[in-house]
Image (spheres, grey):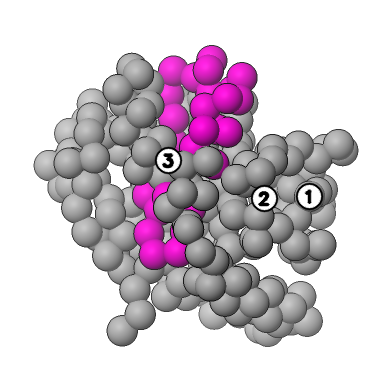
Amino acid sequence: MAIGRQVLQSPTKRMASPISQEKDELRLQARRRRRALAHREERSVQIASRVQSLPEYSGAKSLLAYVGIASEVGTGVLIASAIAGGIRVAVPYCVNDQLRLCWIESLEELVPGAYRIPEPAPHCRERSDRIATLGEVDLALIPGLAFDENGGRLGQGAGYYDRLLEEGRTNTALVGLAFDCQIVASIPVEAHDVPLPMIVTESRIIRPSAPPRSPSRR
């Protein structure tokens, strides 16, 4: 069985609209491009360096970081460096169809979780002082399959991060991490999609010149 975030399916059944069909095709193309990309580890280090150059990072006291797996942008270097530098790091884990956040003190506190994605060990999640919320995070690193220069983000289709970000509308700085090959001309937008104000790749930092586009909320 395939492993990684690519196996996640939407927790709620939905009608296949033209937009969702277009998104599914974009996901297939994005996965192929990312899997075919050479030197992903070196590129991930370059992305980490660019993130660390951001004023949002230098001023952060807390960080939300996904744990990169398979062909995703790796985040291990960023997590370890942040912890070593005194930045509190929260890592997400899945409970039913929701993401929960837990503070970790080292990468050794991560264990294989749902779909073998590393997540905080149970003994960490059970401690009340390790429970984190998005509102406590200064800077959040968000994964995705594809992004566009207007802040559009295409996830795996399950909506985990969209729900997390929608729940926690705060002043948290949101940053999408991507390889250059994941930047596309345009991402179709639906009402539940949460756009990002910044995307970092191995070669550039993308800040949409206009506020991230988003359709009216229901």
> Which residue corresponds to the image point at 80% horizontal and 49% vertical from the top-left?
150
Q: Which residue is disc 3 drawn over?
A: 65
Residue in front for this viewpoint, 71 or 173 = 71
Which comes before the other along the chain, label 3 or label 1?
3
Which comes before the other along the chain, label 1 or label 2?
1
Q: SS class of the residue under badge 1?
A: loop
Which comes before the other along the chain, label 3 or label 2?
3
Q: In the picture, residue 183 is in which quadrant? A: bottom right
Across and down, in percent, residue 117 comes to: 31, 60
Q: Which residue is disc 1 drawn over?
A: 149
Magenta part of the chain: 47-74
Quadrant including the N terminus = bottom left
CB within 8 Å, label 1 to label 2: no
Q: SS class of the residue under badge 3?
A: strand
Amino acid type of the residue tagged 2 in the rendering: Val
Q: Which residue is disc 2 drawn over?
A: 194
Q: SS class of the residue under badge 2?
A: loop
Q: Nearer the viewer, mark 3 or mark 2?
A: 3
